[in-house]
Image: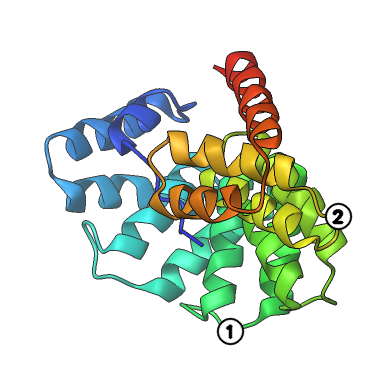
Amino acid sequence: MQFIRSGVLAVMLLASPMAPAAQFDEGVIAYNMGDFSRSVEIWLPLAQQGHIKAQDYLAFMFYVGRGVPQDYEQAAHWYRKVAEQGGDVAQYNLGFLHYIGQGVPQSYTEAVKWYRLSAGQGNAKAQYDLGYSVSRGHGVQRSYREAFQWFSKAAEQGYIPAQNSLAELYSEGLGVPENYVLAYQWYSLAAAEGDTEAQHQMRRLSHRMTNEQIAKAQQLASIWWNKNN
């Protein structure tokens, strides 16, 4: 699992709705100049007024300790504000904090709750982490069948960890009939992105397959790749 950071923050902020625009812009300019303390000073009152983007990035600043002392409780506080307004990234991040007990009490149940909300909006990381939690019975009854559903959704979006996990389910026949061809297909897609574990699993799986099966898997992978790239 991986916490979703705000990417290239400056770029995302510049593309964000601003209210009031002048104040928010001032915070962006300060951030781009490396004056993180000034950015926090500007965004904090906006966040307190309910500005969802200011809340989101203020949470990020507290999480990484940029412009303020690192404070996971404050990060969780502001992510919750955004998550409750439907922000899928914040929902995922809040779920992640609950999963590991960072800034909030550790709770798989709460983690799954927020992952599920984010996953339902199409967030690939949340779909994967929800599938991971379900496959291990963390905060929810273990179900390989449901895990398969969530891994499939994330894998179709090109999320490599989900592609590997989906391939593993096909390879072992967990939650879905055993299918080496489809397992090899998904491993090969992850391997094509440089994932070394997928490359290892492809070699392992190839010893169980015929040349015809491998050719079919490669064909399916090629079709998927051409469709999605």
Of the numbered discs in the image, which one, if any, rests on residue 223? none
Q: Quadrant of the C terminus?
A: top right
Of the numbered discs in the image, which one, if any, rests on residue 106? 1
Q: Circle 2 sits in a helix, a strand or a loop, which is it? A: loop
Where residue 203 sits: x, y (%)? Answer: 49, 50
Q: Is residue 91 above or below residue 133?
A: above
Task: Rate crowding at label 2 as few (under 14), some (14 to 19) or many (20 or more) other CA atoms within 10 Å.
Answer: some
Q: Residue flagged by tag 2: what amino acid is it? A: Val
Which residue bears the numbered disc 2?
176
Q: Residue flagged by tag 1: what amino acid is it? A: Gln
Where residue 189 sits: x, y (%)? Answer: 54, 35
**Residue at 76% of width from left, 78% of height from top?**
137
Q: CA distance from mark 2 to mark 1?
A: 31 Å
Task: Rate crowding at label 1 as few (under 14), some (14 to 19) or many (20 or more) other CA atoms within 10 Å.
Answer: some
Q: Looking at this view, is 149 or 70 the one in front? A: 149
Quadrant in which residue 9 is drawn: top left
- Give left or right: position of 74 versus 144: left
Q: Circle 1 sits in a helix, a strand or a loop, which is it? A: loop
Where residue 106 sits: x, y (%)? Answer: 58, 84
Q: Looking at this view, is 30 or 137 the one in front? A: 137
**Residue at 66% of width from left, 50% of height from top?**
167
Q: Does residue 119 appear in the picture of this structure?
A: yes
Q: Is residue 22 above or below residue 72?
A: above
Q: Earlier in the sequence, mark 2 or mark 1?
A: 1
Q: Looking at this view, is 67 or 128 the one in front? A: 128
Where residue 19 sits: x, y (%)? Answer: 47, 30
